[in-house]
Amino acid sequence: MSTPHLFTPLAIGPVTAPNRIAVAPMCQYTADDGSMTDWHLQHVMNLAMSGAGLVMVEASGVERKGRITHGCVGLYSDANERAMARVLAASRAVALPGTLFGIQLGHAGRKASAQRPWEGGGSLQAEQDPWQTVSASAKPFGPNWHTPEALDDAGIAHTVAAFVQAAKRSARLGYEVIELHMTHGYLVHQFLSPISNMRTDQWGGTHEKRMAFALHLMDAVKAAVPASIAIGVRIAGSDWIDGGVTIDDAIQLTAALKAKGAAYACVSSGGLDPAARIKVGPGYQVDFADAIKKKTGIVTRAVGMIVSPEQAEQILADGKADQIALARAFLDNPRWGWHAADALGVDLPRPPQYDRARKALWPGEALKRG
Ligand SMILES: Cc1cc2nc3c(=O)[nH]c(=O)nc-3n(C[C@H](O)[C@H](O)[C@H](O)COP(=O)(O)O)c2cc1C
């Protein structure tokens, strides 16, 4: 039997993942002024042992005011870098050989200064130490959200410099992959979408001009880190609302980013406007990934309500994406990769300390439900 697609290696620009399973980035809202804590130590270590070929570390704010919440990870200080180095070293020590680690660099823009999800998820209130947010235009995310300041040219240059500094820190930390967060309604997406970008200067007005910030960012980050690192993007396949980003916009953006050296695109959607109506269902963003892959030829990662190994395998077998990312399935089961290997008949090495829980060695396996 030939190896299932999910367990074949994947070249992503200058790096190669040992298989096509990726852990999607997941904010934990548990950092201390941007610095990872013991929570992250167990979280990333667990995911490092998951059997995934690529572990994406959560959205990390490139500057203090670019964090979503007071608890979000950042990469804007030496303390942040030291804390992340500790987590990364421990995680690499337990990962399967060849596992790649990536970091998602982001800026929340007008969606910053927010409460943690379990505190409500809205804008920080006056007594919760809010901060001034920034965006492409001075238009709030929604009712009861802070009104951001529109970035001027100096503000844009400052923000790009913050991305570059964080990318340099990421390179020093030894990440194989750096992902620029361009979706979910955060700052880069705020420039890309006609709903949030009302500018009439060189950063807005036409789709070309709305793309200028994203493309400029790609150029700046690419020039700042060694060519041995894969720089990719996470983009929106749709804003799911009239007048927002469409799949054609996403294809045009991806083609332009690829021409600038983007190694891959992870295709997500939504988050730009609270009025959007997203049609969530199994693999609901896969068709966006498929269209982007077919039209641009970039290495494409699909994500969103992909849960079972068979579902993931089918998407790859159908040629709709090159890599599959899962988020909540890994929170539920941080050994997802091991079980996917079992389900698809692949002999994936496990840490020998845990080998006795293998099907072949543990009669109790047969008693498990589901
Ligand atoms: C707890 C949690 C935190 C998340 N944080 C991020 C993040 O930091 N960056 C990002 O791009 N997406 C983030 N997402 C979205 C996921 O990466 C993923 O795209 C989404 O959950 C859909 O995939 P799933 O159906 O496999 O969960 C987060 C999702 C969850 C559940």
Image (cartoon, grey):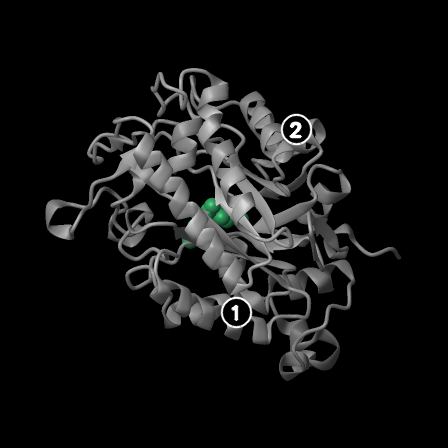
User: Quick check: 4 above or below 363?
Assistant: above
Q: Residues within 10 Å of mark 1 (few under 14, many from 20)?
A: some
Q: Label for residue 46?
A: 1
Element class at badge 2? helix
Considering the image in quadrants, where does the N terminus appear? bottom right
Kind of residue at badge 2:
Ala
The amino acid beneath tag 1 is Asn
Res 4 quadrant in image: bottom right
How much space separates mark 1 and mark 2, taking CA atoms? 33 Å
288 or 181, nearer to the observer: 181
Residue under the image location 44 percent in, 31 percent down: 213
In the figure, is residue 273 to the left or right of 361?
A: left
Residue 54 x/y as whole percent? 61, 57
Tell me if residue 20 comes above or below residue 303 in the rendering: below
Q: x%, y% of residue 175?
A: 55, 60
Q: Which residue is painted at 68% across and 70% down in the image?
A: 97
**Residue 269, how many percent across, how many down?**
49, 34
Residue 196 against residue 146 in the figure, above or below: above
Q: Is residue 26 visible?
A: no
Visible residue check, residue 30: yes
Tag 1 and tag 2, C-beta contact below 8 Å:
no
**Looking at the image, which is closer to me, 62 or 307?**
62
- Residue at the left extreme, as displayed: 127
Where, quadrant-wise, is the C terminus in this rendering? Answer: bottom right
Count of numbered badges drawn on the protein: 2
From the top left corner, tell me how far across and down residue 289 is, in percent. 62, 35
Mark 1 and mark 2 lie on one chain; the one further toward the N terminus is 1
Q: Quadrant of residue 98?
A: bottom right
Q: Which residue is mark 2?
A: 291
